[in-house]
Image: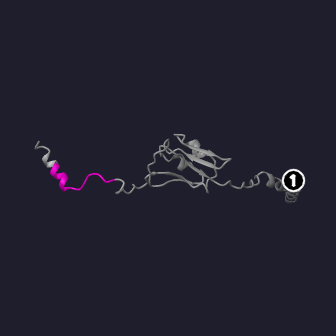
Amino acid sequence: MFTFTPTILKNLVNRPATRKYPFVKRAPFEKYRGELYSNVDDCIFCGLCARKCPSVCITVDKKTCLWECDPFACVYCGICVDTCPTKCLHFHDVHRSPATEQSLLTMHGAPKPKRKAPPKAGDAPEKEAAPKETESKKDAPDKKKAATEKKAKTKK
């Protein structure tokens, strides 16, 4: 019985070892991965994040511009954030608030206007380069004749 007395007295004098959570919250750690968030305004809905996700919790529909994540299946590894080409995925430094029902994180975006394809490198330059080559081929025999004439003059 007397073996617990020092522990009891120490606990009465010192501050509590735990926090009263809903009222006192601890600041998140540096580089803490909390809630996954997508900025759908910047998203191009390529689906790369969904293909790279190891837990298959992300669904991307390009036709309807829908980005959906199941936070209960997500392992918060950050692979999707690293592979996103537009860097529209990121983590908030807080967790989602507790809920009584499971819900998906769904975000709708606006369709992006299609960009015109840049001209292929081989189309326009070849047309311009082809006449130059033929001109240089036509000039080549004249240059050879001139060179042979110079050689003949120097031999004389």
- Toward the front, the furthest residue is 100
Q: Is residue 88 left or right of residue 116?
A: left
Along the viewing direction, whichever of 81 and 8 lies nearer the viewer: 8
**How far across and how far down the image is residue 29, in percent?**
39, 54
Note whether 73 is above or below 116 in the view shown. Answer: above
Residue 26, quarter of picture: bottom left
To which residue does mark 1 refer? 134
Which residue is at 36% across, 54% downward? Answer: 22
**How far across and how far down the image is residue 20, in percent?**
32, 54
Asked if residue 16 shows in the view, the reply is: yes
**How far across and how far down the image is residue 16, in percent?**
25, 53
Q: Is residue 82 magenta?
A: no
The segment highlighted magenta reads 8-20
**How far across and how far down the image is residue 151, in percent?**
85, 57
Along the viewing direction, whichever of 123 and 27 lies nearer the viewer: 27
| Quadrant occupied by the N terminus | top left
Which residue is at 52% across, 40% downward? Answer: 55
Which residue is at 53% across, 49% downward? Answer: 82
Along the viewing direction, whichever of 119 and 60 lies nearer the viewer: 60
